[in-house]
Image (cartoon, rainbow, N blue to C red):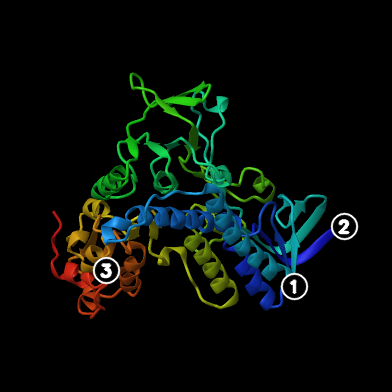
């Protein structure tokens, strides 16, 4: 017998539970289907646990630097079991909070199993069938595992399995040069491991301006992390005490004890039976959606990492807001209204908003660019954290800010001063003429804007 609901939400990641909350508050009956862990990637294997580990790593790093501040800390050691226990406690507390919220929600039925479409309105979930007038897909993504010779012969780690480590790797080799890879690289170096990052491209963080990539590499190398780029032909050989990785023909092999694969993510769309519902995907498996996140089927929406419109917790949550606004609030919100924004949580962090300078240069529009090293930001000097810089690019004709990067202490927070002005579509002079508090990182943003010059 088929259970009937007003709506079915598949996937309890960032967009799912709040949408269930809005739908049930509006009087709808909703099935919340989750095959694994309530809370999705962010709570269980993403932001919450990794940033908790980053905080432990930063504490170890600052303890070792105590003498720089006149503080004698003595020898510093890291207890990985306690580090993991702290991470687990915070993560499990977050998960329980979402579970309790859903379980106590009137009108919500939580069903724990895998869902597959049988027809456009019907899903088989385990031994049950569910049907609804509206269906929302929030199924997330998982790590890409490339076809590397020898990879299948060794026990390697992903961003999920590395979270279960409670011992320190002797030598952690990381394949990948973007966000997950670099955060784990610095984290484990600060815990005390030898770390090597292997990137197939010519530089780290390829989506950023080259100047940002160079600075990020310098930050990591200053902490003793080895960086190998142009790894165009990676091969792995098993050894008694670990493995050897050869980055390209003729290169010296890298001996490691643990291997982390962090080369990208793919959507969890290949086992949903989407073809039974007529839901289209693109060549990479992402569910095709319009500007309001509706799929090729009028009553089915896709939110979060599975729709290819963003791969962050904040983009997933904004997807929920867009869907809820259009369905429940008569508020015609669109994906195209949002500004690209994200952070890289190495230390110091990178905060990013809008276009890169290279993207603006390629567009051919007249622009102004400003830059300021963190060595000339009083707050950074006082904190003894002067690595990095801040950069902004502005449309010379409209005076609107096109993009910014703040790589430096507080960069993940300071970028919002710029992001908010961009969202308001205000002239950069609004920010230029705002009095900020001293001493802060943000107070130098107006100074940087006042010192801009034409982009060449």
CA–CA distance in space, label 2 to label 3: 61 Å
Mark in the foreground, 3 or 1: 3
Work out whether mark 3 precedes mark 1 in sequence or the reverse, and give the earlier one: 1
- Is the residue under label 2 in contact with that under label 1 (CB below 8 Å)? no
Work out whether mark 2 precedes mark 3 in sequence or the reverse, and give the earlier one: 2
Q: Observer-nearest residue: 70 or 134?
A: 70
| Residue 241: mark | none
- Is the residue under label 3 in contact with that under label 2 (CB below 8 Å)? no
Residue with the most extreme right position:
1
Residue shown at 27% from the left, 64% from the top: 383
Work out whether mark 1 precedes mark 2 in sequence or the reverse, and give the earlier one: 2
Indicate whether 316 appears above or below 186. Answer: below
Residue with the most extreme top position:
250
Residue shown at 52% from the left, 36% from the top: 145
CA–CA distance in space, label 1 to label 2: 20 Å
Percent position (x, y) of residue 435?
23, 81
Q: Secondary structure at mark 2?
A: loop
Which residue bears the numbered disc 2?
A: 1
| Residue 107: mark | 1
Which residue bears the numbered disc 3?
A: 441
Residue shown at 36% from the left, 67% from the top: 413
């Amino acid at each position: 017998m088929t259970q009937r609901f007003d709506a079915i939400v598949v996937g309890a990641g960032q967009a799912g539970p709040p949408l269930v909350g809005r739908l049930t508050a509006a009087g709808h009956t909703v099935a919340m289907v989750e095959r694994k862990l309530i809370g999705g990637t962010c709570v269980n294997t993403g932001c919450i646990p990794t940033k908790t580990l980053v905080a432990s790593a930063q504490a170890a790093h600052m303890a070792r630097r105590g003498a720089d501040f006149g503080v004698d800390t003595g020898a510093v050691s890291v207890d990985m079991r306690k580090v993991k226990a702290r991470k687990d406690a915070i993560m499990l507390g977050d998960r329980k909070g979402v579970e309790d919220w859903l379980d106590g929600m009137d009108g919500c039925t939580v069903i724990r199993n895998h869902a597959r479409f049988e027809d456009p309105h019907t899903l088989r979930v385990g031994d049950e069938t569910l049907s609804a007038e509206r269906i929302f897909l929030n199924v997330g993504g998982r790590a890409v595992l490339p076809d590397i010779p020898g990879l299948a012969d060794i026990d390697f780690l992903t961003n999920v399995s590395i979270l279960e480590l409670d011992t320190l790797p002797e030598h952690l080799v990381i394949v990948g040069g973007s966000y997950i890879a670099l955060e784990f690289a610095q984290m484990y170096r600060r815990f005390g491991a030898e770390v090597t990052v292997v990137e197939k491209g010519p530089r780290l963080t390829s989506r950023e301006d080259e100047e940002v990539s160079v600075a990020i590499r310098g930050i990591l190398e200053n902490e003793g992390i080895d960086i190998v780029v142009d790894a165009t032909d990676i091969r792995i050989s098993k050894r008694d005490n670990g493995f050897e990785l050869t980055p390209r023909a003729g290169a010296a092999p890298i001996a490691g004890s643990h291997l982390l694969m962090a080369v990208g993510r793919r959507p969890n769309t290949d086992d949903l039976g989407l073809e039974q519902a007529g839901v289209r995907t693109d060549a990479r498996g992402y569910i095709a959606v319009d500007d309001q996140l509706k799929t090729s089927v009028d009553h089915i929406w896709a939110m979060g990492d599975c729709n290819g419109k963003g791969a962050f917790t904040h983009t997933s949550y904004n997807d929920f807001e867009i869907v809820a606004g259009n369905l429940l609030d008569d508020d015609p919100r669109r994906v195209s209204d949002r500004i690209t924004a994200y952070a890289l949580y190495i230390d110091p962090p990178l905060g990013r908003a809008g276009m890169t300078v290279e993207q603006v240069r390629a567009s051919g529009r007249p622009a102004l660019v400003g830059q300021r090293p963190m060595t000339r930001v009083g707050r950074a000097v006082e904190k003894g954290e002067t690595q990095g810089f801040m950069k902004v690019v502005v449309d010379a004709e409209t005076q609107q800010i096109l993009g910014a990067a703040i790589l430096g202490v507080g960069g993940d927070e300071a970028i919002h001063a710029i992001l908010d002005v961009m969202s308001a579509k205000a002239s950069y002079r609004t920010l230029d003429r705002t009095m900020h508090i001293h001493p802060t990182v943000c107070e130098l943003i107006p100074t940087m804007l006042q010192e801009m010059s034409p982009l060449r």
